[in-house]
Image (cartoon, grey):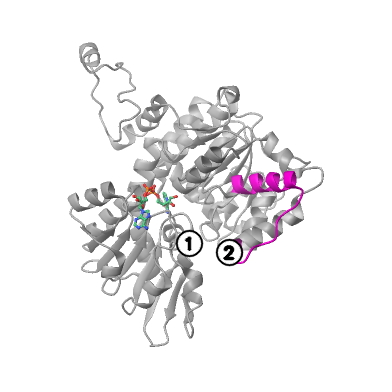
Amino acid sequence: MDFKVADLALADFGRREIQLAEHEMPGLMAIRREYAESRPLAGAKIMGSLHMTVQTAVLIETLVALGADVRWVSCNIFSTQDHAAAAVVVGPDGTVDDPKGVPVFAWKGETLEEYWWCTDQALAWPGGGGPNMILDDGGDATLLVHKGAEYEKAGAVPSAAEGDSEEWKIILDLLRRTVTDEGRWTKVAEGIRGVTEETTTGVHRLYEMFKNGTLLFPAINVNDSVTKSKFDNKYGCRHSVIDGLNRATDVLIGGKVAVVCGYGDVGKGCADALRGQGARVIVTEIDPICALQAAMDGFQVTTLDEVVGTADIFVTTTGNFNIITADHMSRMKHQAIVSNIGHFDNEIDMAGLAKIPGIVKTEVKPQVHTWTFPDGHNIIVLAEGRLMNLGCATGHPSFVMSNSFTNQVIAQIELFTKTEQYPIGVYVLPKHLDEKVARLHLSALGVKLTTLTKEQAEYIGVDVEGPFKPDHYRY
Ligand code: NAI
């Protein structure tokens, strides 16, 4: 088996944590039981690009239990938990000397070149060809396949342009080495039945491609299942934003002034958590609806420029770019903490920060750096501007990821087994499946659901068994 992880000797530790996680992931385990016999993913060749954590290990082993052949990478250079990666490679029945699990190409602290190399490896099936399904988080695997096919059609990979990011140059280099006259990427794209996308940012990319007419295979937008974005993005970040701050800095949050940029699902979870720790929380927003929500939830809402010089902790949650600029950072207080929990690292202008004349970067420990300005004051930047909850801590806990990943597995089954029902486009799972995911998590929390009477169901115009809300309901 081909794979590349940090250290297979960590597999036992990983396996013990996977076993603990399985108990906290009732949705995934119920799906394993439901489909143990029918194995609807038999024949599926799934390439996954999603943070290689303990929780993801339970997802991967669920896909395998349902019959899939899987290859995996992390979707971020800092988010891999090396013990989880090792345990997945060794597998439940293998040993370090005789691994029998799933090929994983991921370790914590990859360079960007290594990151894209890993993605390329996981997209190449032993014996030739590619996957027939992608499970993506942020859309990098989908992007590589699309760009490869696009440049093969054009007959050449373009040169990098002035102002292109370092990462884009790396992608172009990789494609220059891997596009072939026979059309390697074109064939990979043709073989893919569909992609299931995990996060807001990846979903934006998919809708853009569909709008431009460039999307090459159907996609299920897992993010916008209610049981994903209204749980993982909100309650998951409510947990893991504090975990990231604590493990990185252990600064006392109570009494500090914290700025949360963006009050979408992630921002709501982060602002709530910081307030829960006793921080005085300020929100920035561009959307009047979200700004009004933040105000009514009791947060001061103002611009970053107003508060940049007085706040202690900054968290960007927008999925947008250039939210905190180099100029903002130069105006911050001594030892202000700057962090991002959005998918990509461009929310904070790290390249601009590095270009300030005389600035000095010092590693406190991996993924925690001070940047000292020429006047002697410094700021603390977490995870080099990448998502801090996965870079500095271990991301979301199992229970909330069980909701997200149960949606992922159901979406993979939908696209793989009902391919002809999904012409090229971007779809969300039907509401009855969303409700099913929630249902699978109720008993673990001791929730007793009230059952509608037939008369009540008729009165509000729904079925006794659901769905209980129209598609436009916002929760
Ligand atoms: P969302 O779209 O619900 O929220 C983003 C908010 O930012 C919106 O309300 C938008 O109006 C606001 N915004 C945009 N530009 C802004 C600006 N210049 N200043 C202030 N506010 C601005 O998206 P969601 O679901 O909250 O996701 C946000 C990001 O977090 C995405 O990149 C997503 O992929 C990522 N994500 C990260 C997770 C993690 O574990 N680190 C988990 C889930 C999502």
Residue position for label 1: 346
**Which residue is drawn at the image coordinates 53% and 26% (left, top)?**
35
Residue 205 sits above or below residue 453 on the image: below
The reply to whether residue 108 is in sight is yes
Q: Dot 2 corresponds to which residue?
A: 165
Is 204 located above or below residue 370 in the figure?
above
Place residue 216 in its image quadrant.
top right
Q: Position of residue 287 (x, y in %)?
A: 31, 50
Instruction: Mark 2 and mark 1 in contact? Answer it, CB < 8 Å.
Output: yes
In this rendering, the answer to whether 70 lies above or below 365 is: above
Q: Give yes or no for residue 147 being in the magenta stretch.
A: yes
In the drawing, does residue 474 fall left or right of residue 117?
left
Total marks placed: 2
| Residue extending farthest bottom | 375
Q: Residue at x 48, y 43 (%)?
A: 203
Residue closest to the eye, 217 or 238: 217
- Secondary structure at badge 2 equals loop
The residue under label 1 is which amino acid type? Asn
Question: Is 14 or 448 nearer to us in this picture?
Answer: 448
